[in-house]
């Protein structure tokens, strides 16, 4: 079993764990619950009173000088205080041509970590001193731990989600593996998505290599549950049998072995890439190296979700300036032949 035996049980666990996570001693958990509550109006309403009560307590502790947290969390909390915790609304989706704009103000508050670094290589050794998913302060953020096909998995909430029921899936966390995909884990997640999509309709996984805006150098995938197609999955694109060229070089693979052969060649070529695993297929998107001057400034931090056609915006006014043509051009700046 992966997390839960059916979608209803999964959604119930997701919400109940969020509520139980709230504590005056866990500022990081408060930020996580607030961010996750915004993805759905009903979830936001059900958690609103608990969040407001906790915000008042934490604000008092901050003024009294007894609120202890990481520097990242304190910085985010200060932004929340300035904006006003009651001013955060649920996510809103807006269509812009073939693309999707997601009004998601909390996403803009996340620390950039490695996703903002100028990179030269898609491989780095794991460094325990840097942020990783084994840090003790992340224990409250774990939704589930268990095994899938005899592989230990740690599943954590995404602190600044950008997809429905967005989670971080870490295989063999105790092995401290770098963010460098191997065939074993590629085949594992291919089978996971193929089987789990029947349990959680709309289940998928995203992957950012180093050099393609992976923010943490520990092997992990990003799961989500979304039944409607992402823009990259639309039938009008050539890679899906349509007539129109996607702005990035994109290959839809329907064989896990074919997909791995491409990934393996990327490793040989030091080629950054992003992946979208869906049931019985994987979209493969090679891209410019993170930090490349060719890349449009608006997509400097783009990961798999932007490359699949969903753009997070922190202000509704931004939507007026982001025309479909601009978004197409931004994605094209990331592409490689």
Image (tube, rainbow, N blue to C red):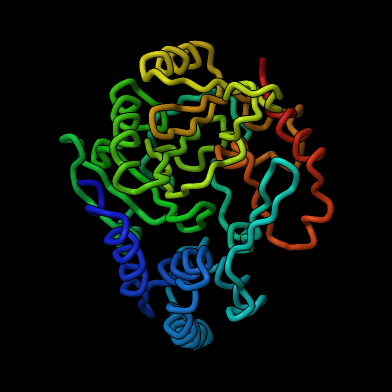
- At x 51% / y 42%, what residue is drawn? 215
Q: Is residue 297 visible?
A: yes
Residue 212 figure quarter: top right
Query: Quadrant of residue 294 in the image?
Result: top right
Q: Return the x and y of residue 181 as percentages of the image width and height.
A: 39, 26
Q: Nearer the viewer, residue 30 or 66?
A: 30
Question: Looking at the image, which residue is at 56% across and 41% down?
Answer: 230
Left or right: 295, with 287 as reference point: right
- Name the spot of residue 244 as percent of width and height, x first: 71, 24
Q: Is residue 117 visible?
A: no
Q: Is residue 93 left or right of residue 136?
A: right
Residue 172, image x and y in percent? 25, 38
* Residue beneath the point at 28% across and 23% down: 184
Relative height, residue 159 to residue 197 (above, below): below
Q: Quadrant of the C terminus?
A: top right
Label count reads 0
| Residue 49 placement: quadrant | bottom left
Residue reaching furthest left? 150
What residue is shown at x 25% (from left), y 36% (from top)? Answer: 175
Q: Is residue 260 above or below residue 176?
A: above
Residue 327 lies, in percent from the top left, at: 75, 40
| 50 to the left or right of 172 | right
Taking depth in this image into account, of 39 and 124 the one nearest to the observer is 39
């Amino acid at each position: 079993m992966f997390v839960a035996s059916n979608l209803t049980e999964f959604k119930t666990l997701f919400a109940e764990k969020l509520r139980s996570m709230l504590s005056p001693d866990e500022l990081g958990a408060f930020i996580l619950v607030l961010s996750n509550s915004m993805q759905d109006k009903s979830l936001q309403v059900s958690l609103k009173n608990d969040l407001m009560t906790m915000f008042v307590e934490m604000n008092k502790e901050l003024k009294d000088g007894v609120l202890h947290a990481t520097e990242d969390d304190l910085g985010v909390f200060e932004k929340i205080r300035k904006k006003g915790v009651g001013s955060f609304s649920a996510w809103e989706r807006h269509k812009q041509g073939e693309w999707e704009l997601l009004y998601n103000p909390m996403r803009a508050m996340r620390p950039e970590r490695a996703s903002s670094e100028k990179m030269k290589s898609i491989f780095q050794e794991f460094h325990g001193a840097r942020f990783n998913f084994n840090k003790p302060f992340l224990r409250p953020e774990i939704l589930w731990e268990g095994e899938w096909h005899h592989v230990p998995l740690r599943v954590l909430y995404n602190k600044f989600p950008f997809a429905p029921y967005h989670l971080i899936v870490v295989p063999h966390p105790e092995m401290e593996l770098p963010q460098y995909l191997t065939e074993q884990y590629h085949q594992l997640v291919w089978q996971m998505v193929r089987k789990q999509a029947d349990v959680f309709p709309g289940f998928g996984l995203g992957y950012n290599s180093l050099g393609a805006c992976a923010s943490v150098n520990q092997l992990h995938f990003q799961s989500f549950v979304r039944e409607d197609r992402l823009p990259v999955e639309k039938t009008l694109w050539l890679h899906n049998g349509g007539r129109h060229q996607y702005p990035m070089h994109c290959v839809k693979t329907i064989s896990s072995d074919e997909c791995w052969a491409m990934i393996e060649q990327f490793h040989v070529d030091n080629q950054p890439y992003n992946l979208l695993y869906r049931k019985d297929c994987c979209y493969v998107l090679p891209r410019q190296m993170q930090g490349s001057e060719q890349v449009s400034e608006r997509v400097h931090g783009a990961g798999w979700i932007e490359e699949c056609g969903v753009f997070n915006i922190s202000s509704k006014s931004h939507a007026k300036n982001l025309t479909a043509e601009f978004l197409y051009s931004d994605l094209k700046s990331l592409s490689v032949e």
